[in-house]
Amino acid sequence: MNTNSIYSINGPVVTVKNATDFSMMEMVLVGDKKLMGEVIKLTSEKTTIQVYESTTSLKVGEPVIATGNPISMTLGPGILQNIFDGIGRPLKAISEQFGAFITSGVHMDSLDSDKEWDVEITRKIKDEIHFGDIFAKIQETDLIEHRIMVPQGVSGVITEIKPSGKYRIKDVIAKIKDDNGEIQELTMIQRWPIKTPRPVSRRLQITIPLITGQRVIDTLFPIAKGGTAGVPGGFGTGKTMMQHQLAKWCDADMIVYIGCGERGNEMTQVLEEFAELMDPKTNKPLSNRTVFIANTSNMPVAAREASIYTGVTIAEYYRDMGYHVAVMADSTSRWAEALREISGRLEEMPAEEGFPAYLPSRISQFYERAGYMETINKQIGSVSIIGAVSPQGADFSEPVTQNTKRFVRCFWALDKQLAYARHYEAINWNLSYSEYVGDLEKWYNKQVDIRFLQNRKKLMKLLTEENKLMEIVKLIGSDVLPDDQRIVLEISRVIRVGFLQQNAFHKEDVYVPLQKQLRMMDVILYLYQKSVTALKEGKAFSLIQKTNIFEKVIKMKYDVPNNKLEMFDDYFALIDETIYHIR
């Protein structure tokens, strides 16, 4: 490898003059400490490199070494339960060896190469194998079986293979004779460029929802497995809290949580809380199926960009094993700010609000890596991406929010007023939408009931009517409205407080199955229907209100256990009796 020397240093941006042996997107080692960097611009006179580690103490004249490879992530057993920084270094192992703060130039293998794994071999001598084929299995955690796959560029006939037993990740398990007669060795690990999507056999149609147990999502604004969602919200609106809830309760097999540019104390809290959480489906630690990428706000700014790609690369790797993976990116705004800072140092022409002109393409490339796929090895897996956005001053017209909105099909707009009113989740039903409803219709009709989406439509209509009426109420009050409109307002309040608002600390309300969501909608709409009928019979709205029936229906979310849905029948009888006895 030829070496060149540093010509200039501008924060994380380093230049080398008159170099001819670099390639675009190539990983390079910068300075005496061999800091990790990436070539981002090439001209005949100058090579520009962004450095993913702190450039403090770096000097002009220090060497820059080309590696010939792009920035890649080591993939293999040991990823789960681990915490990586933005460039794939294991933070637990680094803290044990070097202390709490990462110094520049720390190099350590992503995965523990000394740990022995109990490997089950699934292929035999003379088998023909190709890229993506599974040739061994490991029980990585109690919940996830790790399927060892043939890396890209390897195919041929197995000439040697070890028996099942205990091996380290770098041990040679099998030898392959390729078409050229050359022998290639297979271990448990493979390297993959983080900015290159892993290939699939074909992209499948999205038809299955990602069930979250959160009523406002599952009913009003569902996301599909393999889908994308943007979660914009100002400071304190509950973006991080919401992603924690989804990580715990959604029916994905695996969670990849990317803390991109988040505050250090907030990231610490996330890691500590996840370590204590129990998976409600299995009563095992939730960390058994979770990977963390921790890139806090005090870490080098360039590494924020890499953290997003590192996380989605890990997700694609487990998708290729046949798992459904949910990626939580918190927050993509910090990633965009990193792009803006690097762009400024490169003296590129700024676009709107100083962001680079290529911001939309970068956001689209990230979300495009989601999907419901048939993998190369004929497994079915998916990557769902839920990206938080932190617009300054809760201004949804800023570029990151607007460009995210272009490329996601599910938009959960968090509202500051709802959050301050302790309405959880603080999703504003007037600003949010989901384009997956039509794709998921057949699934809901078959797996739940045909009434589910019909009821959803009626609820959305009532909430839209309420929104229009509230403009009048703000001007002249609700007392002057006719009774039929006052019923709309009262039923909409029941929908908001009794259905959309959820209590994350109540055992029956923290997670709600779809059948219970359906029955709750049935009861609310039955109350509305009966109230409208009572008005037509000449009964005043004020008399209906005095019965306290609306408050009783609101409390059903707490009073009906998730496993005793037959209790909803009592509410229909209660509504009939209450309305009948109004005089």
Image: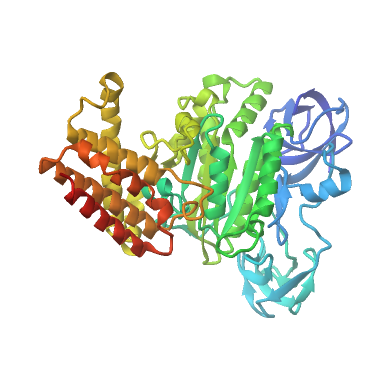
Q: Position of residue 51 (x, y in %)?
A: 75, 33
Q: What residue do we see at 74% from left, 36% from top?
A: 52
**With 348 as the anchor, is 108 left or right in this view?**
right
- x, y percent for residue 385: 52, 47
Colouring chosen for the image of the structure:
rainbow
Which of 275/489 is in front?
Answer: 489
In the picture, the quarter occupied by the C terminus is top left
Quadrant of the rendered image containing residue 26? top right
Above or below residue 576? Residue 2 is above
Q: Is residue 462 left or right of residue 207?
A: left
Using residue 349 as the reference point, say whether residue 581 is left or right of it: left
Residue drawn at point x = 62 percent, y = 47 percent: 257
Q: Position of residue 184 (x, y in %)?
A: 74, 67
Q: Is residue 166 above or below residue 245?
A: below
User: Looking at the rendering, in which quadrant would you find the N terminus?
Assistant: top right
The image quadrant of residue 519 is: bottom left
